Image (cartoon, rainbow, N blue to C red):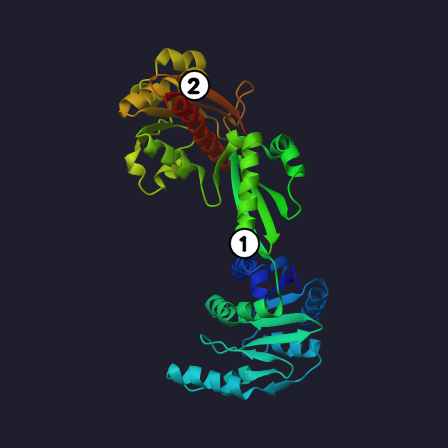
Amino acid sequence: MANAKAELLTIGDEILYGQINDTNSQWMSQELDKVGIRVIRKTTVGDNRSDMLQAFEEAENRADIILITGGLGPTNDDLTKPLLAEHFDCGLKMNLEALEEVREFFRSKGKEITPINEKQAELPICAEKVSNTLGTAPGMWLERNGKVFVSMPGVPHEMKKMMLDTVIPKLQKFYKTDMIFHKVIKTIGIGESWLADEIREWEKALPEHIKLAYLPSLGQVKLRLTAIGGDMNQLKADVEEQIEILHNYAGKYIYGYDKDEIQSVVGQMLKEHNLKVAFAESCTGGYVSHLITSIPGSSSYYQGTIIPYHNELKANVLGVKEETLKAHGAVSEETVIEMSNNVRKLFNADIGIAISGIAGPDGGTPEKPVGTVWIAYADGEQTKARMLQLWKDREVNIKATAIAVMNLIRITLSKSIEIKN
């Protein structure tokens, strides 16, 4: 069967109550994707008989593979085993192999097994045991009409061991699936709808086996290409060919791929060309510098930061002229131009970056509403400033400004490096 579809069922009130996070589903999705099994739905169900039975039935109607985690403990509120037996219309019976594995687990820990723990070896008669080498709850493999149910513990390290050692290899034999290859192209400086318009013709011409998804986030849009077929090397080559074509449409917005982050890409550009940068951050309070210094090796291109939050510091420490502040205000093109040039000299850097704005939620005026931010770049040969019109959310404005600053550095360096080369 090509393109087997899987549904993930997570069992437990504690997840619905928000007491623990469901990290299992994300990990399972990633591992299934590697072997060509596509997850079509993830569902969390509480410890409730009718809800669980309904979830089993609906999942079986939708998917080829139903992977269940949780509800395998030895207490009365753990319902997965008896309800799977009911769903498959078979009873529970002590599995002697499972019982010996549970007993051996307790012996290895120097503990006595209790009757309630022995009951964990009771499995549906119609189920095949899946060994749990790291815990006391065996897993279960059940088949019906070409569909597969697998029930595993909710404890992450137990589930992962079971998936990698037994479940995934067995699924690969049961279903002959196509391979799936993903490639993420990261863009910056253009919104989703504008980008979609720019690349419309390219998207329309994509081969049938390659699909495109837009993944927008603050100040950035990721494009995910997903190729499906029988030859992984060919899939990779096909995707790379499409990316080459995409550069003709949106190359100036592309800054990286897959796990690349804008701060690491900018840092690499600075490092490769032996440039040092310094920052004067007002409304962002050092957040841009935090991003820059989060990259290992940033000391080779990062000189330092001053955070002149108040006007007297802009004047007395950074050297912005009093008349500039009085005539134009702290949030102005004139002020950030002086800030960027002065911080470059103050820290003996090649590039000076300045930021001044009204992050919010208060402090705006009709002329300069909340979300008004000025940023500037100076390198001794050129100085450029940009005004951003952002939102009324303080945290969002700080992060959006940081992304805009990174992009300003990226664009300016790309152009100046191209000219110098």
In the figure, residue 402 lies in which quadrant? top left
Numbered circle sitting on residue 152: none
In the figure, residue 180 lies in which quadrant? bottom right
Instruction: Name the residue: 60% across, 67% down.
Output: 67
The answer to whether residue 388 is seen in the rendering is: yes
Horizontal and vertical percent for residue 144?
Answer: 69, 74
Horizontal and vertical percent for residue 87?
Answer: 70, 75
Instruction: Name the residue: 54% across, 23% down.
Output: 369
**Residue carrying label 2:** 384
The answer to whether residue 317 is seen in the rendering is: no
Left or right of residue 87, residue 97 in this image: left
**Residue carrying label 1:** 232
Left or right of residue 383, residue 233 in this image: right
Residue 260 or residue 151, whichever sits in front:
260
* Quadrant for the C terminus in the image: top left
Vertical arrangement, residue 98 with respect to residue 141, above or below? below
Residue 268 or residue 284, whichever sits in front:
268
Residue 251 or residue 42, whichever sits in front:
251
Instruction: Name the residue: 34% across, 19% down.
Output: 341
Camera-near label (2 vs 1) is: 1
* Quadrant for the N terminus in the image: bottom right
Type of amino acid under label 2: Lys
